Image: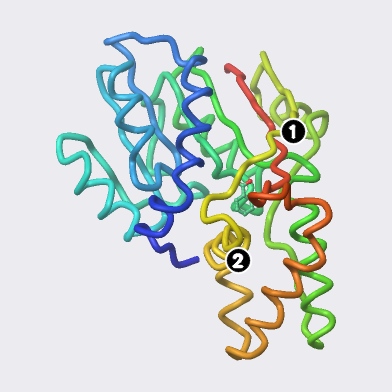
Amino acid sequence: MEWNAKLYENSHGFVAEYGKGLLEFVTPDPQQAILDLGCGTGTLTGELALRAGRVIGIDASPEMITAARRSFPQLEFLVADALELPFENQFDVVFSNAVFHWLPDHDRLLKNIRRALTPGGRLVCEFGARGNVGAIEDAFARACEEQGLRYASRFTFPEAGAFAQLLEANGFTPEVVMAYDRPTILKEGEHGLAHWMRQFFAGPLATMSAREQEAVLSRTEELARSKLWDGSAWVADYRRLRVVAHI
Ligand code: BEZ
């Protein structure tokens, strides 16, 4: 997927903002090395650098890595695929915020992470749990159908129990595997949901004509309004899976 790094940072800075809560699971240690998997524009990589001797941020998007290098020229960033990590036995912590749900194969992902960790190393991550943005996806799918289009979700939002089992099957000992609702206020008032969709449903929207795009966006708003509009802002129905596990 192509990312608009500026739009992401200006309108969706809450992604990194919420990720800061996850940092409390990373005990500062100047001896440790941390991999920030899916670092985006590097906001949390900068925070992780204060807790480690070495930190590397990786992202599949060259545009994000360019933005991260611009903001944090003193840090190490690399364009890399999380399903093909070029690391073995190198990191004490693999940290990841709001990334796993973009990746279709969590088994392969965990195998890559395990290989990248040193013995006793920890995975600290948070991402979309089963039901995440369900009201948005349902409304968007129905709006697409009404235009004669089909929406197939590209996200992987697992249940806590299934993910805990997958961790164990890959040699991790889960410490925390917790799903929780995290309603998230979208910026830009009335335009907030459309902005969110333009960023995160950019793939499906790109396959539509301009007329279809407008019809789908405004119909999604109509369908989702009773659940997600609180009178002054759109509140996205985020549901997170928080995970801490060691090998
Ligand atoms: C999320 O962070 O949960 C998310 C973001 C964009 C689309 C779907 C989910």
Q: In the rendered view of the protein, which quadrant contains the C terminus?
A: top right
Mark 2 residue crowding within 10 angstroms, few (<14) / some (14–19) / many (20+): many
Disc on the earlier residue, 1 or 2: 1
The reply, left or right, for residue 100 in relation to residue 43 is right
Please, which residue is most extreme toward the left here?
74
Taking the spot 52% from the left edge, 23% from the top edge, the residue there is: 21
Q: Which of the pair 99/136 is nearer the observer?
A: 136
Confirm or reject: label 2 Cβ below 8 Å from ligand 1.
no
Q: How many labels sit on residues?
A: 2
Q: Amino acid at mark 1?
A: Asp
Give the colour scheme shown.
rainbow
- Residue at mark 1: 181
Q: Position of residue 182 (x, y in %)?
A: 68, 34
In the picture, residue 206 is in which quadrant?
bottom right
Residue 212 is marked as none
Q: Is residue 206 above or below residue 202?
A: below
Taking the spot 35% from the left edge, 24% from the top edge, the residue there is: 48
- Residue at mark 2: 194
Q: Which of the pair 22/154 is nearer the observer?
A: 22
Q: Position of residue 71 (x, y in %)?
A: 22, 43
Please, which residue is most extreme toward the front here?
231
Q: Which of the pair 36/16 is nearer the observer?
A: 16
Secondary structure state at the residue bearing disc 1: strand
Q: Amino acid at mark 2?
A: Ala
Q: Is residue 178 above or below residue 146?
A: above
Between marks 1 and 2 in the image, the one whose residue lies nearer the viewer: 2
Taking the spot 73% from the left edge, 47% from the top edge, the residue there is: 230
Taking the spot 50% from the left edge, 41% from the top edge, the residue there is: 14
Secondary structure state at the residue bearing disc 2: helix
The reply, left or right, for residue 155 in relation to residue 112 is right
Q: Position of residue 80 (x, y in %)?
A: 38, 51
